[in-house]
Image (cartoon, helix red, strand yellow):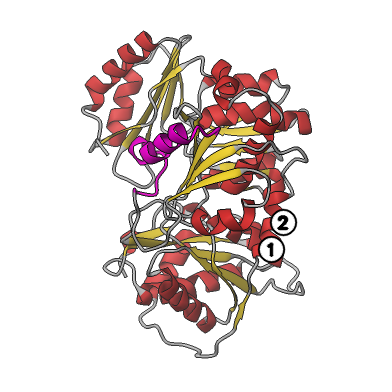
Amino acid sequence: MDPTIFKAYDIRGIYPDQLNEDAAWKIGNASATFLRAMLRGYDRGLANKQSLCVGHDMRLHSRALANALIKGMNAAGAKIIDIGMIDTPQMYFAINYLGTCGGVQVTASHNPAQYNGFKISGLEAKPVGVDTGLKEIKHIATSLLHTRGSTEEMIEKRDLTEAYKEHVLKFLGSKVKPLKIVIDASNGMAGKMVPLIFEKIGIEIIKINFEHKGVFKHEPNPLIEDNLKQLKDTVKKRKADIGVCFDGDADRLVVVDGKGETISCDILTALMVPYFLKKSPGSAVVYDLRSSWVVREEILKAGGIARRERVGHAYMKKTLRTARAVFGGELSGHFYYRDNFYADSAFITFVHLINILSSSDDPISELVKPLQRYYASGEINFAVDEKEEMMKELKRKFSQGEIDDLDGITIQFKDWWFNCRPSNTEPFLRLNVEAKSKELLDKQLKEIESLLGEPVKH
């Protein structure tokens, strides 16, 4: 087994060269062994606590990998509830709804079609990453010398569509405007789930890239502007209210307004702040440290508690739980909810956006205009060999600013700031810069790039 498939938050590799059925069996065996061992101290009498959920996305090799994963889990003595082809947030719902000790979703999320992988969750859908068990699972899996064991199949197949639909739509308000919305499913799991959940709620949905044929019309990563071109063109052509692009496993989304302009995800977080704090006054809201200054300002303005956190779903979810935060948002398009088991959900985010738009006479472009008061670079990648040395150099260069090391380095001045951090998933330094004017942004970006070099082009 190729050990490099184990990443910071999940397991991913190219099929079948790096990740195949043999690896899936071992990962299933190791995951079941680890997750069931974590039950110590819990009430083992609960109906499904000894069981694990398994689901998979629409990639051509996902079902075969799921079957091998299940066999490895069975060999470790685990009973499996197979919930079929689902979006990743449905896995978080299933673990909590069924009361299992965890689950594994077979998916490579936003990666190209030749990739696949596994997202592992524990009790209550708590994420299993390198600091919370993935290191141990890797050790067990890579130590296995064979893929033999019990041939007894302990599998129950369940279709949770109706229960999941009910869960998602319980957040929908009583007043729904007849909005016209273009949805780009990115040939991913939104193509299956959007018609099942949203077609009868009173909005008009214009579908693009809903087919599952094993190929992607564009890479299923909505954070890359080029991947939004078809969505933007369709929104303008059809005069839609908004456009929404989901990623491959439908746990993230990006929104464009009726003019075809991208609304950055930190601005979406800021837009949702008063909506949530009106429902839960004084609550905490969690945001990742790449987010615009406007997010913190809006939280404080609405009487909430601003909780700034490092990048990554494991950190966001942990802080959401400890702070009992009503919701949280990341620049990557992940949005997390207290009333969704502290987990992220793109479909629940979509519902809340429908509620916000339904309660206003203004288009979303007008709603976000007051929030777009700063100028941001967006996330820029740089290939840097000596990452730690470069960050030390940035500290020396900008030592007059206020410096913190929560995630990489963040240096703030009165009229601009930047964060530079090493990627958890790629060999890059990632840079985000924000300033009070476009001229200042360009000036500071140029100064930082003189140290970091040429940005990496997608």
Residue drawn at 48 percent across, 9 percent down: 414
The residue carrying mark 1 is 162
Magenta stretch, residue numbers: 218-241
Give yes or no for contact between labels 2 and 1 (Cβ–Cβ under 8 Å): yes
Q: Depth check: 226 or 375 in front?
A: 226
When the figure is inspected, residue 219 is found, relative to residue 107, above or below; the finding is above
Instruction: Answer whether residue 420 is visible to the viewer in this image.
Output: yes
- Residue 91, image x, y percentages: 59, 61
- Where the C terminus falls, by quadrant? top left
Tag 2: Cα neighbours inside 10 Å, few (<14), some, or many (≥20)? few
Picture coordinates of residue 187, whole percent (x, y): 42, 55
Q: Three-letter amino acid code at disc 1?
A: Glu
Residue 427 drawn above or below residue 3: above
Q: In which quarter of the image is the N terminus?
A: bottom left
Q: Is mark 2 on a helix, strand or loop?
A: helix
Q: Is residue 280 visible?
A: no
Q: In the depicted view, which residue is nearer to us: 65 or 135?
A: 65
Using the numbered discs, state the Cα–Cα distance from disc 2 to disc 1 in whole angstroms. Answer: 6 Å
Q: Which amino acid does label 2 sit on?
A: Glu
Q: Is mark 1 on a helix, strand or loop?
A: helix
* Residue 225 colored in magenta in the image: yes
Residue drawn where x is 41% and y is 60% of the image: 11
